[in-house]
Amino acid sequence: MDFYFSQRGPSEALRACNLSAQVEAPVPASTIAGFRVLGGDGVSVEAPITWQHLAVLVGLSLLVKRRRLHWSCWNGVPGLLSPANFLEEEGNRGLVAAVFGILFSSLCVLVLDRDPLPLIARSSQKYWKILALLYYPAFYYPLIACATVRHRVSYLVGCLLSWCHCVVHIWQKVDCPQSPKIYRYYSTLSYIPIILCLVLLSLWYPALLIRSFTGQEETLDKEVMKIHGVAQGMVAWENPSMDLQCFQELSCPAAHLSLLSDTPLRFCLTGFRIPLKLVLSITTAVLAVYQVALLLLVAVVPTIQIVRAGMTKDIVILLVQFGLVPSESPAVPVVSPHSSTVCYICSLVLCCLLTCAMLLRTLVMHRNNLKALYQGAVLDVFYKAHILRPSRQAIVCWMSFAAFQTAFACLGLLIQQVIFFICSVGFTFLFIIPLQSGTNTYLFKIIQNMWPFWLTLVVAVIVQNLAAHYQFLEQHPLRKELTNRRALYIVTYLLFPINVLVGVLAGVWRMVISGLYNAVHFSQLDISLLNRSVETFDPGYHTYCHYLKIEVSQSHPVMKAFCLLLLQLARPEGPPGLQASNVEEGIQLMQPKKAPPSRARFKQTRARWWLAYTLLNNPSLTACRKTALSDPTANGTQLSSPKP
Amino acid sequence: MDFYFSQRGPSEALRACNLSAQVEAPVPASTIAGFRVLGGDGVSVEAPITWQHLAVLVGLSLLVKRRRLHWSCWNGVPGLLSPANFLEEEGNRGLVAAVFGILFSSLCVLVLDRDPLPLIARSSQKYWKILALLYYPAFYYPLIACATVRHRVSYLVGCLLSWCHCVVHIWQKVDCPQSPKIYRYYSTLSYIPIILCLVLLSLWYPALLIRSFTGQEETLDKEVMKIHGVAQGMVAWENPSMDLQCFQELSCPAAHLSLLSDTPLRFCLTGFRIPLKLVLSITTAVLAVYQVALLLLVAVVPTIQIVRAGMTKDIVILLVQFGLVPSESPAVPVVSPHSSTVCYICSLVLCCLLTCAMLLRTLVMHRNNLKALYQGAVLDVFYKAHILRPSRQAIVCWMSFAAFQTAFACLGLLIQQVIFFICSVGFTFLFIIPLQSGTNTYLFKIIQNMWPFWLTLVVAVIVQNLAAHYQFLEQHPLRKELTNRRALYIVTYLLFPINVLVGVLAGVWRMVISGLYNAVHFSQLDISLLNRSVETFDPGYHTYCHYLKIEVSQSHPVMKAFCLLLLQLARPEGPPGLQASNVEEGIQLMQPKKAPPSRARFKQTRARWWLAYTLLNNPSLTACRKTALSDPTANGTQLSSPKP
């Protein structure tokens, strides 16, 4: 809006801001600190307030970080403050998703706005716009960091911050709902996702604070967090297929995991949780659909109406010239006042629904892919065998996955809208309006004139099918055989020219279906738009494949369960509900109902397997094995201790 | 040309026909019988001559057919006259391909011509055009049938026919090389493939005739033909994978097939022959590329030149309005007189080369696919397991395969031309011409203004890659591990907005690459343009898959070899060079060099396997087994007879 200040002068901008009924009220925005709320004199008031606000936030986060460092020193967790544990599932998923939604919506505002940073004047915008790409994540950083610290004070700070943000944004939009940008309510509408996400945060933090006072979730969260301390030291899953098979062969220790019934891990193992990173990407993608659809709606519909109003007569003349409209008709129904607008909005709604459906389908496919990869069925997911271990490329792809998903949703919606709008306008003007007005246009005449041609093609295809079924295929009781070969060759030769014309139609269908398929599935990263032999050249699919590798290698449920078991073994006094006795109980549950032939041997085998399995996947533990887990036999005995 | 008669009157049409230097000569065409050669009074002369010619052809072919019936009664080959044995490789491949080329070129002429049939007047064209689709294959039928009869008389008739056709066509085009259709030499140029194919036929038939007098090829051809008599009675290959593995386990009887060294079968087994049907489809596809390119060249280039000549000033004004050209420049270089024509021709040449390259690639891929399927590696070719047996759908697809390949080559060339022309024009007008003229256009200004943006994106990607390699990936000696997780999460969070912008670029790239890939590979039927999970919805790939099934099930080289062996066993006196002694020799060749541990058992196993294999795949032989092959043991002993 500063842009408009500079363009039109303050008085006009004020008028633009107060286009609504609140003209008589003074501009109250300067009373609210920072947050790009405009005072009458713009930047000079805003800049120091925003700096002050930022300093408070940074100071607070440093304070929290120091506490965190202390706390983490006690428990061996790396002390760096993390905004979101994307791989570790215990976080507040809704909260993280809301912050990412705010971030993306700010990016949308930023790209279209000509005043990128609240604290910088209107000179040299492009550099500040680039800087703003890094500024906004840092600006909203405390909102997400307060939740990951897991302390009452941080929750309280989070409450205050989210309330503050939320109130300021709502106040700003209620105070000045209109702006002269594109469409007068566009700015307000594009801020709705930010406000909704802030409302969610404003409710989430108090809930966390209250829950921290009741104290139910605290110990459990800490327990689960420590798994990741161990998991971080563990090596990536090398060969999940073999491991999981071994696991299952040993009479299903999945039952053994019933001792985890109180933790989210159990849900993770049985109910299957979609990874946080995917939740984030879907959230931002849905917001992207909203923002792009909003932009397409408010930017194009008025243009269409203006064009239609101004060019009605010209269009009619053009249509008559192209022979689409008979010249004698009054042509009023042809350029029906709202047909193009209706087409546009219908296709936009269809595009939004399709894109959202594809995003949901991504969730389902991702769930299936993850399950298949956890079970080692690599070839069910990838066309070629992949090694599921982290690599440089995989990490980069994992980092950019959510952003790519969001960007692809934007582009996919745009492409679909262009295609569907053209199709719907063509369909309306070539079929529906001529049918309504009862006039025969050029297209209908072509179709009418060519009916013998279509009939010939249909008859030829039917004849070939019938001949193939009744003449060239001998219905042998055991199997089908080819027969009447020479007649087959003659028919093939004679129908060659007609089949070429059928082939042209099939080719057109191939073009249409591949174009439509690619447009509709553009927003899905989990399928490649290229042929399977070159599918990794598709940047979207390439990113997804590598993302999947990291997800599978780093958050295999069996690995998580083992981490928990190891933690319990190292500290038998553990949290309530996860005592060593429970491990015993789990092992008892695991025993088969009828007596096995050689029980001692079975137990020994299992113990050895557990040890080998742990050490195989944790070579780093080998060094400290003699101290932590005194010796292999003892460890095995400890796990499969004397049974009543 | 009759169309032009009716439109312009005979005198003008004569003038059009005699535009060349032969104006003083009288029109000699009416002296030549039929063949759409125009006399001065057009149709009235032509129709009865064509009917007469057709009657001669039909009578001749009926005569030949009766001879064939007699001949086939002697030898058990089904008596129906077949134009081409597409599945049986022994045919004269070049000859068949030439006739199909003539057929397709006639179709091209037919579609664009408004005078479809030579014997019908210019009334009710569309019905006669449809009828012509069936007329032309029947018209050229004798040309192909004379070769398949395999007799001297038929070769002689073939010589006469092809010479007659060839002379008439060449005479017609020399006499009247110009026509007022589209472009004056278009008709002549589009007839060149027909004339070339007829020249090929005119040389091929005499060669066949001469070879039939020398008598070398006769017996061998007959021998090979009889294989297919047996093969026709045989059942389709049920499970090539198992069979071929058994085959290989039994110390490679492929060596055993060295006894076939004199027959084309050996070449078929070792050198690998591309099926006749595929040769046909590639031939007609190449002709299709020629015809479409010719049409694109002669129909569009004059239009471009006319448009350019007429609209030079308008285009300049338009370009200036769009800001592509600075208004102060004289703008002469912008609309360089030949730039658009050069773009058009360059892109056309590129398209033709690309399409031909893709057709060659089809050959290579087909060879690989067939080899893989012969070895039973179904999953190397198809994404899902297929049963390789004939079905109604497979037969229909097999019948229309060559026609589809041709039609897809036409459409693919058209699509590529549209895309490449637009791209090359855009590239020329936005990059090359501004660079030449030294003026900064709008596009250059955008790129110049946005360099900090591009730099930011590049730096962000490089930073992520470096960080992933040096910070987040622990270079463990054994395997790579993920480390510094919390820093990874922070970087992921902070770079999210920049990654969204990178994702937009990746999305644009995805769009471009998938569009280009699909356009370039449109003419290839052996790859699907859709994702692998829905790839059979692509009509081209669907046709190819089914075509492949028929090819593999009906012409497996092992099956062919067995047919030959069976024929020899049934008739040991057989043709020279294929005596029973040769079978013995082949079996001796098959023996391993060093003595096997249990030779007798090995031989017995092999004999039993051979018997079981033959009977398994030929249930129809079970009934006559006691008579033809006296008993299992005898048969086994016969095959693995006493070794010296």
Image (cartoon, coloured by chain):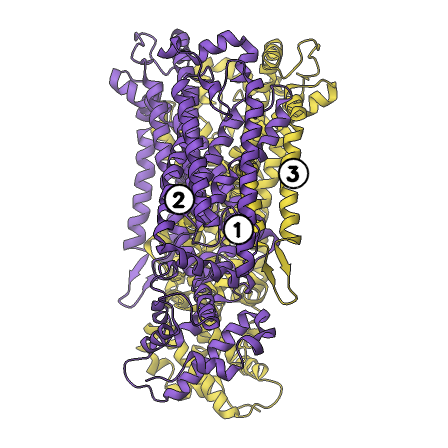
Chain colours: A purple, B yellow
Question: How many numbered marks appear?
Answer: 3
Measured as percent of width and height from the top left, residue B45 is found at 43, 26
Q: Share a chain, discs 2 and 3?
A: no
Label 1 or label 3, whichever comes before in sequence order: 1
Instruction: Indicate the position of residue A503 as horizontal and vertical percent values.
Output: 42, 40
* Amino acid type, callout 2: Gly
- Mark 2–mark 3 distance (CA, rounded to whole Å): 32 Å
Characterize the local packing of mark 1: few (<14), some (14-19) or many (20 or more) Cα atoms within 10 angstroms. some
Query: Hey, what amino acid is under mark 1?
Result: Val
Mark 2, residue position = A94
Q: Dot 3 surroundings within 10 Å: few (below 14), some, or many (20 or more)?
A: few
As drawn, the label of residue B458 is 3
In the displayed structure, would residue B619 be above or below residue A467? below
Q: Is residue A288 left or right of residue A431?
A: right
Mark 3, secondary structure of its residue = helix
Q: Alpha carbon of mark 2 to alpha carbon of mark 1: how far?
A: 61 Å
**Chain for mark 2?**
A
Along the line of sight, the residue nearer the viewer: B203 or A474: A474
The numbered dot on residue B279 is: 1
Chain of the residue that carries numbered disc 3 in the rendered image? B
For the residue pair A552 and A479, the one nearer the viewer reads as A552
Question: Are callouts 1 and 3 both on one chain?
Answer: yes
